[in-house]
Amino acid sequence: MTQRTWKIAPHDVGDVGELCRALRVSPLVAQVLLARDCRTPAAASAFLEKKLSDLHDPELLPGVPAAAEQIVSAVKSGRRITIYGDYDVDGVTATSLLWHCLQLAGAKVDYYIPSRLEEGYGLNCDALRQLHADDPDRLVVSVDCGITSVKEAALSRELGLDLVISDHHQFADEFPADVTLVHPRLPGDYPFGDLCGVGVAFKIAWAVCARLGDGKKASPRMREFLLSAIGLAAIGTIADVVPLTGENRVLVHYGLGSLLERSPPGLKALMKISGLLDKGELQAEDIGFALGPRINAAGRLGQARLAVELLTTEQTDRALVLAQYLDELNKNR
């Protein structure tokens, strides 16, 4: 076996001492915090303590105010809203989260997940044409895809199909034109650019819930939904392997606790099949190696719609059937 030579990152003795004194931690813990780029007592304290209040105001995220206004308008006018998601775990959880939000709001809502095998990733023109043909008055909201879909946005504009694009992937020099774009790295004042697709969807849902409440705060019913939705946000965040810093760290910390306390029937069934339901405490590895692969198996085999159905069904028996099926797909893929 080849012997590894470890290179230890040097740390300023003064910085280590400052954290030790301010936080009453050992030099080793202080060095770990510095390695995580927590260079001040305030930053280190925020990293260690994690509060829901550390989540940034969704109104700061570029595109969220406009997207939330369009969605709430569609809800109130009775227009159909179609959530267009990606087929991976991030896209499936983002689709499911926004579906739960809009269903609770009384919207006419459905979803579209392209087949990985037949349609490939992201928005596609054939799907948009079909959605328009079925209901030209609908609003399409993409989650976890679309920021590079210049041609598809142009088609939507040509058809007169309203489109909101929410994404977190790297964008190109040219953006989709004349549509609402929601992305944490677009120019603006948003302080955290590493949200994944379901993190962005959570922010949209939060803004929608606030508008359906008193304009600033969600109703108690919608607030309870948001607390449960953090579980879905945690699954997608872990599975998409985005940095577990900032808001992602908060979402994962509270989401792991929420999964055991507030999960809908589909997630409970999947946790039961995965042997997680009786655990006293979930860890990120439980998502990465148990829940995530089972959800992802459906998308890899062109059946991501079944994963969304699992995460949105309220029927316990159906949830168990779907969870068992996804478990078999994961074993056989």
Image (spheres, helix red, strand yellow):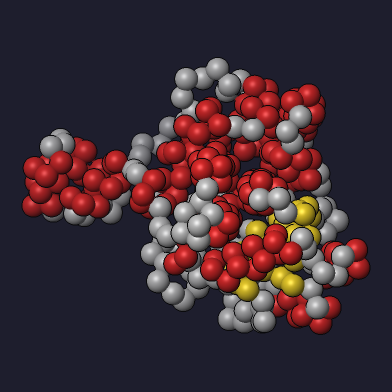
Quadrant of the frame with the C terminus? top right
Q: Residue furthest top?
A: 278
* Quarter occupied by residue 153: bottom right
The image position of residue 72, as x and y in percent, is 64, 62
Horizontal and vertical percent position of residue 271: 62, 26
Towards the viewer: 244 or 214 = 214
Quadrant in the rendering for residue 2? top left
Side (left or right) of 186 relative to 290: left
Task: Name the residue located 77 percent from the left edge and 63 percent from the top edge.
Answer: 79
Q: Is residue 217 left or right of residue 299?
A: left
Residue at (72% x, 54% y) in the render: 107
Q: Residue at x 40, y 71 (%)?
A: 189
Q: Is residue 333 above or below residue 125?
A: above
Q: Is residue 1 visible?
A: yes
**Residue 321 screen position, x and y as percent:** 80, 26
Q: Is residue 155 visible?
A: no
Q: Residue 65 location in percent, x, y?
A: 54, 68
Q: Above or below — where is 100 with respect to 1?
A: below
Residues 2 and 40: in front is 40
For the N terminus, the image quarter is top left
Is residue 312 placed above or below 171 in the rendered structure? above
Q: Residue at x 74, y 72 (%)?
A: 162
Residue 78 appears left or right of 191: right
